[in-house]
Image: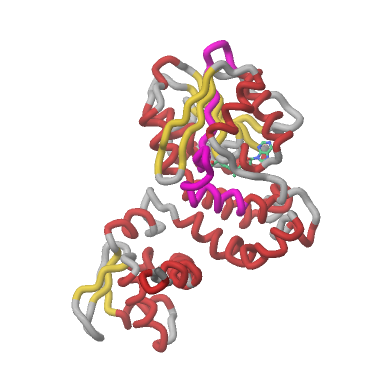
Amino acid sequence: MAQLLDPSRIIQTGFGFWSSKVLLTAVKLGVFTELGEATMTGEELGGALGLHPRGIWDFFDTLVALGFLQRDGDGRPARYANSEETRVFLDKNSPEYVGGILEMCNDRLYRFWNDLEPALKTGKPQTEVKHSQKPVFEELYSDLPRLEQFMGAMTGISRANFAALAEKFDFSKYKTLCDVGGATGLLSVLVAKRHTHMRCTSFDLPEVCAVADRAIGREGMSDRVKTVGGNFFTDSLPKADVVTMGMVLHDWNLDKKKHLIKLAYDALPQNGAFIAVENIIDDNRRENVFGLLMSLNMLIEFGDAFDFSGADFQSWTREAGFRKCEVMHLNGPCSAAIAYK
Ligand SMILES: C[S@@+](CC[C@H](N)C(=O)[O-])C[C@H]1O[C@@H](n2cnc3c(N)ncnc32)[C@H](O)[C@@H]1O
């Protein structure tokens, strides 16, 4: 009956960009980094961030209401502090900082999602490539700050998933791993730290390997984590017992996905494992909202690229010759789709 229905979920979702933009702006301005372990009055925090007094209270109290700041007291003398989660994940000085992905959301994706409608009508990307016509990664990496921002974004979105993979997957049967499209080498570093018998190779475009070498060195892991520069559309992969791809398959159309799966197959020994870490969509395509939104994001970023379900992964890997397949949940909307040769 109509009178029992409640429109508030519709309204809340429609206005979702308000809360999203408050969080993204707080990250961009460095609210959580400025606070760190401290407590500050609204005027102190606003002053440190260079904010006009008009918005200070509405902005900080919205962050309190959203659960991203804590406030002790009321009115002008009240003191603001990070929540437990923002202290760990959104203070840039924390080793577990994940805000890089939110910085990229603010600076790139927020604008591009305004063009979801033309993306749906044309099937074409709506990013920087709309104007330059260059391939996505070439365009993204043509500017060093943008390359670094993209690497920070990948670290932010992937850290918890890679840590869960290092914890949950049984690496005891294997000795070597090659992470394809390894970006800063984070997956390799986390696996090598957790499993001291493992030797890992992070494979990516040469310009990315330079960034990865520095990150691996900072982690003190250069003895067991190496980088190899190459292009997975023209080069073969280094041989390894386990081949991983974190959010790589979803960047490409079906033909290219199949090329990458074949490449992984060829790099593995018998019984080797191929692991795709992705926001795997449930087979009925009804539940993993983030996975489905990620696939729309791939339309906006690349046009013909898309995210996929465990059943899709199984059919493509079977076709390539893999003998069995499983999906292992990692963290939040992310899972590992695993195929065994
Ligand atoms: C979406 S990012 C994923 C990064 C990381 N695996 C993660 O999950 O956080 C895709 C990665 O593929 C790499 N890549 C793109 N085209 C490539 C190519 N032709 N050959 C090798 N790597 C490539 C990019 O440089 C980037 O690091």
Residue in front for this viewpoint, 164 or 228:
164
Of residues 309 and 64, the one drawn nearer to the viewer in this rendering: 309
Q: Could you say where residue 86 lies in the image, as x and y percent from the top left?
A: 34, 59
Is residue 107 rendered to the left or right of residue 262? left
Quarter of the image where one finds residue 247: top right
- One can see residue 255 in this view: yes
311 is within the stretch colored magenta: no
Tell me the quarter of the image containing the N terminus.
bottom left
Instruction: Tell me what residue is drawn at x 44 percent, y 43 percent.
Output: 159
Q: Quadrant of residue 248?
A: top right
Q: Tell me if residue 213 can be seen.
A: no
Residue 235 is left or right of residue 39, and the answer is right
Count of residue discs:
0
Q: Is residue 91 above or below residue 172?
A: below
Q: Residue furthest left?
A: 73
Relative to 253, is 327 on the left or the right?
Answer: left
Name the residue at 31% across, 65% down: 67
Residue 292 on the magenta span? yes
- x and y, in percent, of residue 190 in the image: 42, 34
Give the residue furthest to the right.
133
Which residue is found at the position 21% from the left and 82% from the top? 74
Q: Which residues are magenta?
A: 268-297
Q: Position of residue 326 (x, y in %)?
A: 48, 26
Picture quadrant of residue 246: top right
Furthest residue toward top: 270
Q: Quadrant of ligand 1?
A: top right
